C-alpha cells in the first residue's frame, strides 16, 4: 500500500475549497434562477501502479446520447435506492467497470461540480485495495484505462481551450495523457484536485 502517497491525498481532501462548475471559465454565462440540479456521484478510483498511485478512468461509448466518447470517471445520477451519492458512485463503478465495492476504501469527497446537463456531481475519492478484473459495461463504456495521479494533479499539465457551443465560445480545462483527451467536467474536477494536492 502506497502509504505516503495516500497520506498526501488524505491531506488534500481535508482542505476547504469552493464548488466548481462547467461555467467557471465562462463568467459571462447567466444561469437561470431556481434551476433544479439533480444529484450524481462519480468515483475517483485510485489504485497502486508501478510508479505510485494511478487514477482509473473510462472512455464513454461513442454510441451514447450524452457525452459520447468522452473521458469520464465511473458514475452517474443518484437512484432512489441509493443511500447517498457515495453509494451512487460505488454502485455505478461496479456496473460500469466491474469494480467490487468491497475493495474500495472511501477516503472522502471533493466539492460538488455543476454540469451543463444540470447535475451536481459529487466526486468520491476511493483507494482500490487490490487488483480486480475490469469488465467495461457494454454500450456504456468503450475502454477502461489508468493515468498516473501525478500527471493529472500537476497544474502545469493543464491548459485552457475553447470550442463553440450553442453559438458561443465555451472555455474549458484539458489535461491530455497519451492518446486520451481529458477535458470538460473530468478535467475541471482533476484541476481542483491538483490545486489541493499542490
Image (spheres, rainbow, N blue to C red):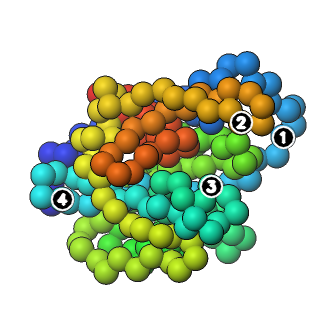
Q: Earlier in the sequence, mark 2 or mark 1?
A: 1
Image check: 103 left or right of 60? Answer: left
Q: Which mark lies nearer to you, 2 or 1?
A: 2
Instruction: Count neighbours of disc 1 (C-alpha within 10 A) and say few if under 14, some if 14 to 19, many if 20 or more.
Output: few
Q: Earlier in the sequence, mark 3 or mark 2?
A: 3
Residue at the (72%, 70%) spot, across then down = 80
| Numbered label attached to residue 35 | 1
Q: CA distance from mark 4 to mark 1?
A: 41 Å
Residue at the (24%, 41%) spot, across then down = 150
Residue 44, given in percent of the width and then of the height, sits at 41, 54
Location of the C terminus by quadrant is top left
Q: Earlier in the sequence, mark 4 or mark 3?
A: 4
Q: Earlier in the sequence, mark 4 or mark 1?
A: 1
Which structural element holds mark 4? strand
Q: CA distance from mark 1 to mark 3?
A: 21 Å
| Numbered label attached to residue 49 | 4
- Residue highlighted by disc 3: 67
Residue 185, given in percent of the width and then of the height, sits at 55, 43
Q: CA distance from mark 2 to mark 1?
A: 20 Å
Image check: 133 left or right of 51? Answer: right
Q: Earlier in the sequence, mark 4 or mark 2?
A: 4
Which structural element holds mark 2? strand
Look at the picture and state if 181 lies above or below 75. above
Q: CA distance from mark 4 to mark 3?
A: 28 Å
- Residue highlighted by disc 2: 165
Residue at the (38%, 31%) spot, across then down = 158
Q: Quadrant of residue 54?
A: bottom left
Which structural element holds mark 3? loop
Look at the picture and state if 192 lies above or below 43. above
Look at the picture and state if 6 lies above or below 171. below
Image check: 33 left or right of 148? Answer: right
Amino acid at each position: 500500500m502506497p502509504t505516503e502517497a495516500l497520506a498526501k491525498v488524505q491531506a488534500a481532501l481535508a482542505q476547504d475549497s469552493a464548488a466548481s462548475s462547467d461555467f467557471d471559465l465562462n463568467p459571462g454565462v447567466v444561469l437561470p434562477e431556481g434551476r433544479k440540479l439533480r444529484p450524481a456521484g462519480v468515483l475517483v478510483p485510485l489504485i497502486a501502479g508501478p510508479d505510485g498511485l494511478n487514477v482509473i478512468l473510462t472512455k464513454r461509448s461513442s454510441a451514447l446520447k450524452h457525452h459520447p466518447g468522452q473521458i469520464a470517471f465511473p458514475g452517474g445520477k443518484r437512484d432512489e435506492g441509493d443511500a447517498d451519492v457515495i453509494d451512487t458512485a460505488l454502485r455505478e463503478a461496479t456496473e460500469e467497470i466491474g469494480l467490487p465495492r468491497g475493495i474500495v476504501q472511501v477516503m472522502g469527497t471533493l466539492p460538488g461540480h455543476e454540469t451543463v446537463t444540470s447535475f451536481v456531481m459529487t466526486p468520491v475519492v476511493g483507494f482500490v485495495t487490490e487488483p480486480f478484473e475490469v469488465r467495461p459495461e457494454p454500450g456504456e463504456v468503450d475502454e477502461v484505462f489508468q493515468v498516473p495521479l501525478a500527471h493529472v494533479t500537476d497544474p502545469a499539465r493543464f491548459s485552457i481551450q475553447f470550442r463553440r457551443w450553442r453559438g458561443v465560445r465555451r472555455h474549458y480545462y484539458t489535461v491530455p495523457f497519451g492518446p486520451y483527451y481529458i477535458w470538460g467536467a473530468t478535467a475541471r474536477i482533476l484541476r481542483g484536485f491538483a490545486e489541493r494536492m499542490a
